[in-house]
Image (spheres, grey):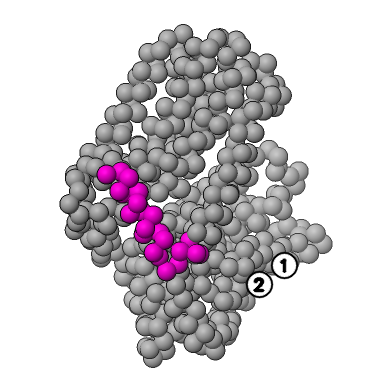
Amino acid sequence: MVLQLIKLELLKSMRSTSFAKSALVAIFLAFMAVVLLAYVLLLGIVLKDVLEKVVENADAYTTLSSGLIYFFLFEFMYRYFTQQLPVMELERFLHLPIKKSKIIHFLLGRSFISPLTLIAPLLFGPFAYREILPRFGDTAAISWIAAVVLTSWSLHWLMLWFKQKFEDSLTGIGIVFLVLLLGAGSNYFGWYNLGEIIKPLFDWCLTSPIPVLVLLGVFGGLYQLAFIYYSNNAYLEDLSQEENIRFANQDLGFLSRFGLAGEFANLEWKLIIRHKKSRTYLMLAGFFLLYGLIFYNNPQYKADEGFSHLFVFVGSFITGIFMLQYGQLFLSWNSANFDFFLQKREGVEALIKGKYLLFIVVSILCLLASIPYVYFGWDILLIHLATFLFNMGLVIHLVIYLSLWKPKPMDLNKGAMFNYEGVGIAQFLMIIPMLVAPYVVYLPFALIFNQYIGLAALAIVGMAGIIAFKPLSKISVQRVLDNRYEISSSFRQEI
């Protein structure tokens, strides 16, 4: 049965009309995976030397065992964003005369074949060979690496269950933020050393096989948890209707007060929360609100007078991250229904103005959410306010204008990680207006006069752009109208 299912997968790929393109993409991704795994292996080989020189601790094992829990917390985070779920594949098999349990076992097993599965053994295997084996013996080295690998692999099954049950819900987002706080906040704020609390478990592996047996049981238990959950929820009507029902009536009613553009902004919001890729961008924007914690309290960026010039970029990034991320694919989000807007009177103009409106609303929310950064000084609040005004007055138009250069179609139901649909050269240039434009205005005044005059210049230019919003937005509207048929034709291309 497994061989038959593998055969069906191969036939599905080979019979696809985009087989050549898919094959090239697969070859490229496989090459990138091999390169990245090679770097991981290289890091594993030199990990002992790195720990001894960078941490300045002769006992590399003690250092690593104390920090292993942070690796697993980080693994939980990157698996949340990158690990793919096998759920959509179920729809193709459930109507066939095959036992549901066999289908789910096959899909779970296939999901395990991933580069993510190899990271832990490639990273820590060489360390166990170079450090633990000479000091503690063969049995201790095997037991230790087995414990590390089983912990990593257990996270695979845990994430399959977690993402299917909580993905995109407030509970799921809250848990992810809690894990981030647990991992980074415990040491950053000096609450407790989580690594030292967990370290005895890995030390125990050196003298006893019991921890390995316990972790083997956890590995099997989490696999069974994922299997039972998928078995109980593997019904065609659940798979096809669950997301539509969950997000059916989510809207921002106050946007309707802004006429047809407001209605389209509301539709855009519904599009964001109903589709996986756009929801991921929204969640990432929330995570990037924490970006300031890396810089604002870092002694490396302390200035003798005033503040670091780098903070202008950080403030611009925090208050405009959603506009930059979501705006870089400005029309690609609507590639599936762009013809609908062409057929409506003033439909294209209202669509673009609705997107402008949504970017402004979300950027205001980002500004309000960043107010607690005033804890690091009133300068930070002034920076955020000035960069917000500059983003709304000028950067928003630059980003949208660049994004209209040969937009490409994309499938909204696919995930955002390692998905480059809709991405072209213009999207890689998006960082330029965010990085360069504020400094073109800020630096001359900051260097000639002082930093606060530079912030005032940013704010004044931003307010001038806000006052001139209508003529500036008409530039983008007119560009779409002039190229609407070419854009519509490109959106009909097969992804």
Q: For the point 49% across and 22% down, which residue is it?
A: 145
Residue situated in front as seen by the camera: 291 or 329: 329
State the CA–CA distance, disc 1 to disc 2: 8 Å
Callout 2 crowding tier (Cα within 10 Å): few <14, some 14–19, many ≥20: many
Q: Which residue is mark 1?
A: 441
**Furthest-bottom residue in this view:** 345
Q: Position of residue 46 (x, y in %)?
A: 67, 28
Quadrant of the drawing holding the C terminus: bottom left
Q: Amino acid at mark 2?
A: Val
Q: Position of residue 414 (x, y in %)?
A: 40, 59
Q: Is residue 74 left or right of residue 305?
A: left
Residue situated in front as seen by the camera: 123 or 477: 123
- Is residue 260 highlighted in magenta? no
Determine whether 161 is above or below 348 in the image.
above
Q: Which residue is mark 2?
A: 461
Q: Amino acid at mark 1?
A: Val
Per the rendered image, the range of residues in magenta is 1-22
